[in-house]
Amino acid sequence: MMGQRQHVVLLIFSAFLLFQTSNAHNITRLLAKHPSLSTFNHYLTLTHLAPEINRRTTITVLALDNAAMSSLLDKNPSIYTIKNILSLHVLLDYFGAKKLHQIRNGTALAATMFQATGVAPGVSGFVNITDFKGGKVGFGAEDNGGSLNSFFVKSVEELPYNISVIQISKALPSVVAEAPTPGPSELNITGIMSAHGCKVFADTLLANPEAMGTYEDNVNGGLTVFCPMDDPFKAFLPKYKNLTASKKASFLEFFGVPVYQSLSMLKSNNGLMNTLATDGASKFDFTVQNEGEEVTLKTRVNTVKITGTLIDEQPVAIYTIDKVLLPKELFKAALSPAPAPAPEEAADAPKGSKSKTKSKSKTKSKAAPTPDSDSPAESPDDDPADQVADDDNAAMCFGAERLAVVGLSFLLVFFLL
């Protein structure tokens, strides 16, 4: 009897592992089995699109054979323009060969990875798919005047409802995707911020040569910026002006991370993140957390939310945040007065526990100040740090999910016996 139970448990565990691994895909390995797509595969790796594709599910890759890629490369586009063009060939939905011929009303509009970068204006990041009579399926960039001049050739690889790789006859022409794209060192990051609601922060950064130099030094190697919107940063400026010169530089550097982090990476890599101001004992870090599509950044002082994407093109990403994130090294949490205990309640209340998840990130070696007595005393947003409550709630949710999984496993074993 015991042997049978062990056998059943082993089968369940094996099925669980199979389920876990079946949800993973590797676009490079899938394409490696098809030599005629080797150039396309090479440029997915070279442009760093391959890791982005691997992180996503429910996705379709419109692959180009070597001849189609040769025609594309004959125009001598920069590697950054090639990335934009190829990202237009990655649909954020699943289209297997069967689904292509069962499109409702014969046509569909699909969002692409190019649209998800935030740099494609209007509908330029969408692809039109039309099922013609006779089994012919056409594809065209939505900003191409409705022209469908690339066609379905064959299904290459399909992992149903996870990833589909289909070959199309030629690259999708798009004026926006094919436009010359500057390299990272040519990007005007403060100009991008100024034009999209972060002008006060950008001007403050430009006025601080030390901090601005640190940002510029990290652009080519990888940089992620979280810029506060104008209204909250303008309200914070009086407290910023009270900081010493070295603290002003560290504070501004705190909003930059010395690695590229796409939004999908931020959603999947929760935990502590170092910043441009991190230096040894002066941590200047914050915690990334997400609930569904919402991504938040937390310190012991306050919590802010990512509200938009200004640019997301490796190696640079810039996001807007709704409030000014405050490092614990320079600011203290505003304490809310505790309510008076009721007569029948005990005098001592239980204390919440704090937990942190560490994550590794590139750090920049430079001097950063340590907190001292002249640091401002409270947050400009007048909201106390709420990390304890959030951590406890997260722990309770995680524990409930684990308990449900364990319970279902035991129930399955019981019925099988």
Image (cartoon, rainbow, N blue to C red):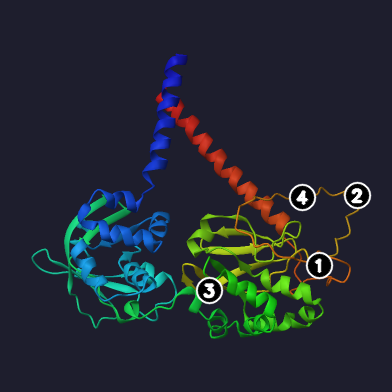
Residue indicated by mark 4: 352
Q: Badge 1, how many Cα within 10 Å: few under 14, some, many 20+?
A: some
Location of residue 210 with respect to 281 vertically, above or below: below
Q: Are marks 1 and 3 in contact (CB under 8 Å)?
A: no
Residue at image point 68% right, 80% down: 209
Give residue 99's quadrant in the image: bottom left
Q: Which of the two discs, 2 and 4, labels the residue nearer the N terminus?
A: 2
Give neighbour class at mark 2: few <14, some 14-19, many 20+ (Cα, 10 Å).
Answer: few
Q: Label 4's element?
A: loop
Give x and y (percent) for residue 88.
Answer: 32, 70
Quarter of the picture containing the N terminus is top left
Say which label, 3 or 2, has the lower sequence index: 3
Residue 89 seen anywhere in this rendered image of the structure: yes
Question: SS of the residue at dot 3?
Answer: strand
Amino acid at pointer 4: Gly
Mark 1 — residue? 334
Which numbered mark, 3 or 2, is in the foreground of this view? 3
